[in-house]
Structures are given as C-alpha cells and as structure tokens.
Image (tube, rainbow, N blue to C red):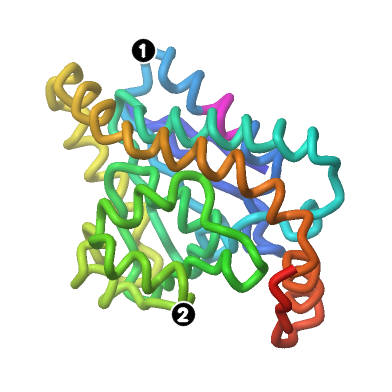
Amino acid sequence: MIEQTLDDGVLVLTMSDPSRRNPVGHKARMMLTAALAEGQRNSDVGAVVLTGGGGHFSAGGDISEMGASTFSQSRDRFSVMKDLTSRMTRFPKPLIAAVEGWAAGAGFSLALACETIVAAEDARFIASFAKIGLIPDMGMLATLPARVGAGRAQQMMLNPVPMNAPRAETIGLVDHLTEPGAALDLAVSLARTAMQAAPMPRAYIRDFLAWQVDAALEYERQLQPLLGRSADAAEGRAAFLAKRAPVFTGK
C-alpha cells in the first residue's frame, strides 16, 4: 500500500492503491507514520518525497472505514492521524508532495502537511469534508489558512469545489507547477537541492510553524468522532457511495 524507494538520498513514498485513487485509510496512515519515522532515523535519507500511484495523489479518507467503529475506536484512529500529521509538519528533513490528479479531502491534507507542494498542471484540489458531514482533519484547519489566508481557506472548506493547479499556484497553495506526469521528477530534483541546506534551522522553523497545527489536531480529535457518528455524516457517506447529492438535516 505504501511503496518505498531510496535513490541517492531521496526516499520516495508512494501511496499505491490506484484502483481506488489511493485512499488514506487507517492502515495507510500507520504505514506512512512508520515509513517517516524510519526515514527520519536513517542517515542515508536526506529528503522525502510523498506521491501517489496510478495518476492520482490521493482521493482522501477511506469512506468504507467511516462510521463502522465505536467512539473509543474513533478516538484511537485520530491519535494515529495526530501522530502522522505532527510528524509531517515537524519533519526535520525536506518533505515534498508530488501531486498528479486528485488531492481531495485527507489527501489534500497530506499535501498541505508537506513543506513544498509540486503539482502537475492538470492536478486538482478539494477540501471535500463538508460534503460528507465532517470538518477538515489532519491539520487542514491550520495548514490551509497558513498557505492561502483565513478568508480564502474558509471559503474552500465551507463551500468545497475543485481548484485546478494553475489557480492553486496563483494563490500560493502550490509552490511549483510542471507538465502532467512530471511532478515526481521535479519534486525529487527539488528535494536533492533542499537536502544540502543546514538541517537545524529547517527543524526549528518547521517546529514553530507547527504550533497552530497542534491546536487544530486537538480540536478535530475532540469533534470529528462525534460528527462521524451523526445522521448527517451517515447521509454524506451514503450519498457519496450512491453518487447522489446529500440531504442534510443538521442531526
């Protein structure tokens, strides 16, 4: 599910479930956390690039997992999400997202947790949580406003519509654009350059910027399990699977 390759100091982590556009389920989150922990410890790793297989970055959380767990299990799952996001936003080595195709929901959150986002010109981004009755998670409440400003981030989260990569670059959401199919190559090249910089300033800068992410993670850990068990969330999941518009009641 998470493929790893190490070439000349750059560790490439590839989310690989292309038939489902690489969902970020519980198992994938645990595997990413373990891979990043090992990458941080391994002196042969100078930088990490995160990407997705099959022409997409990630379509987001695994809808099939949602709503099936107890409240306690949900809280445990969010502890894993908090660990992964905290590790990414404080990662002491260059961490770059290479985005092709869709980065939606939690997949979008993963990209935002990286210090640099490289996107193909035909990539698309959407903060789709409200469509299934949830608040953004994996730190997006902090990482999206940090990139595009509070007002624009609020609109993107409250009124989720797809944003193409050229527009995303214009507003500061994407750092580098490239032609379709070339995002990974450019990300690896940028990673090799970034890994030559002094490591301690990077670690301290990333740590400082992650303080607001900590507050967002705790907020979502408290609220998302409750929202996930609401009637609106159940309707959102059902509508998504049936490919119809949801009918929310506020319950």
**Dot 2: few (<14), some (14–19), or many (≥20) neighbours within 10 Å?**
some
Q: Quadrant of residue 134?
A: bottom right
Q: Which label is found at residue 176?
A: none
Q: Residue at x 42, y 36 (%)?
A: 215
Q: Is residue 136 above or below residue 180?
A: above
Task: Check disc 1 and report the residue beneath it.
Answer: 43
* In the foreground, 6 or 231: 231
Element type at mark 1: loop
**Which residue in the protein does label 2 denote?**
161
Question: In front: 124, or 181?
Answer: 124
Instruction: Answer with the quarter of the image where residue 194 lies.
Output: top left
* Residue 33 pos. (x, y %): 56, 29
Magenta-tinted stretch:
31-35
- CA gap between label 1 and label 2 equals 41 Å
Q: Is residue 139 magenta?
A: no
Q: Is residue 179 above or below residue 69?
A: below
Residue nearest the viewer, comparing 37 with 178:
37
Q: Residue at x 55, y 45 (%)?
A: 220
Q: Nearer the viewer, residue 223 or 51?
A: 223
- Asked if marks 1 and 2 touch (Cβ < 8 Å), the reply is no
Q: Main secondary structure of the magenta part?
A: helix
> Where does the C terminus fall, quadrant-wise?
bottom right
Instruction: Please tell me whether mark 2 sits on a helix, a strand or a loop.
Output: loop
